[in-house]
Amino acid sequence: MSSTGLSTLALLVAALCILAGVYYLIPNIYHVLTFHDATQIQVKHALAFFAVAVVLFVGSRFAQSSA
Amino acid sequence: MTWFQTIFLAVLQGVSELFPVSSLGHTVVVTRLLGWQNFEANTNFLPFVVLLHVGTATALFVFFWRDWVRIIRALVTTGIAGRIDADPNGRLAWLVVAGTIPAGLIGLFLETPLKQLFSNPVIAATFLALNGLLMLAGERLRQRALATSGTAILASGGSLEMARPGQSILDASTPDGNRPLTSLSLVPAVLVGTAQSLALIPGISRSGVTMVAGLLFGLNHEDAATFGFLLATPLIAAAGLLEVPNLFAGPQSILLPALVGGVAAGVSAYLSVRFLMRYFETGRLDPFGYYCLVAGIGSLALILR
């Protein structure tokens, strides 16, 4: 895969991670892959997805710079 | 929980978290053999477990503080520059980040069901023995690969070429046949990091599996141990710090023993990592492999008799 393609893919996955993070912050809905209080806000899950999004964003810049 | 139990379990956690012998496996097996309740599984003792992790992570941060300063500085520098070659430490910094992500996510999603499924002394003792076999097999594979590599070097008239990141141990560049840590590429780093998730199973050691994975990708023992400890630090810290808000949810009477336990775990973890980093300058995983094998089979015999 080209560096530009890799960079775009990383940005797309980062956007999905942000959406997943927001999903875990919405109260009173069922959250998948949680093992207690599945309808409550899942801060740890949200933080994890936001952190991965930040890493992917930086990774996309690395990929761009090597293009 | 008595003061003796507090100190005993804290020291056990501090030592066995970093030695490649599985802290969770030891806690599950030892508490059963001593006839104590399994404190790890009891939510009333959450503050105790939280502060043990915070103590261990603090010890790792203190021991590797120079590396962490370099890593964090490199993360900021390369992140702003948008180029990984902007800082010589940038590569290691991002390898640590890349290696931490899969284990972090797997831990987040699977820790609870795996602990519920495997927190049984018989299973923990069985996996402890398997952990020993894994380390012994890892050492054998590495020695075989090094021997093949040495033969290849001799056959080529002793010429050594720089290995490309991602190549196998047979292409390693250093005279002893090992690959420098900074030459590790993204995929091996992610795989070494992912191997950590096996430690969610009681009996499988986090440092043991990461070291075996590192050795199989061509690192020497010292670099494999360093990379394993660097990968483990954010996860152990997160396991503790993310639970800090729940610290006061349990009975308040546990807070003082938990604090003392955290300090005891931190001190024993610091002494352990200091010993291990000196040991792995020349030592191998075999003694720990034999120990886990004997301890696992012995515990199994004692539990099932």
Image (cartoon, coloured by chain):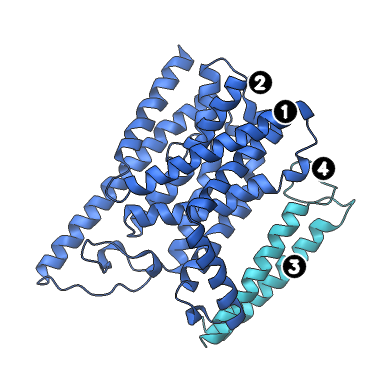
Chain colours: A cyan, B blue
> At label 2, which amino acid type do we have?
Met
Q: Nearer the viewer, residue B176 or B54?
A: B54
Question: Is B223 left or right of B248, judged from the image as shown?
Answer: left
Q: Are marks 3 and 1 on the same chain?
A: no
**Where does residue B43 sit, x and y in percent of width and height?**
72, 31
Residue at left 45%, top 46%?
Answer: B207
Q: Which residue is mark 2?
A: B1
Secondary structure found at label 1: helix
**Where does residue B4 sit, x and y in percent of width and height?**
58, 20
Chain identity of mark 1: B
Q: Are marks 2 and 1 on the same chain?
A: yes
Separation (CA) of disc 2 from disc 3: 43 Å
Secondary structure found at label 4: loop
Q: Residues within 10 Å of mark 1 (few under 14, many from 20)?
A: some
Q: Earlier in the sequence, mark 3 or mark 4?
A: 3
**Where does residue B80 sit, x and y in percent of width and height?**
61, 80
Label for residue A37?
Answer: 4
Please determine whether, in this image, residue A46 is positioned above or below residue B21: below
Separation (CA) of disc 4 from disc 2: 29 Å
Q: Are marks 1 and 4 on the same chain?
A: no
Chain identity of mark 3: A
Question: Is B108 left or right of A36, judged from the image as shown?
Answer: left
Q: Which residue is mark 3?
A: A18
Chain identity of mark 4: A
Q: Which residue is mark 1?
A: B254
Q: Are circles 2 and 1 on residues that touch, CB within 8 Å?
A: yes
> At label 3, which amino acid type do we have?
Ile
Separation (CA) of disc 2 from disc 1: 9 Å
**Where does residue B250 sit, x and y in percent of width and height?**
78, 31
Secondary structure found at label 3: helix
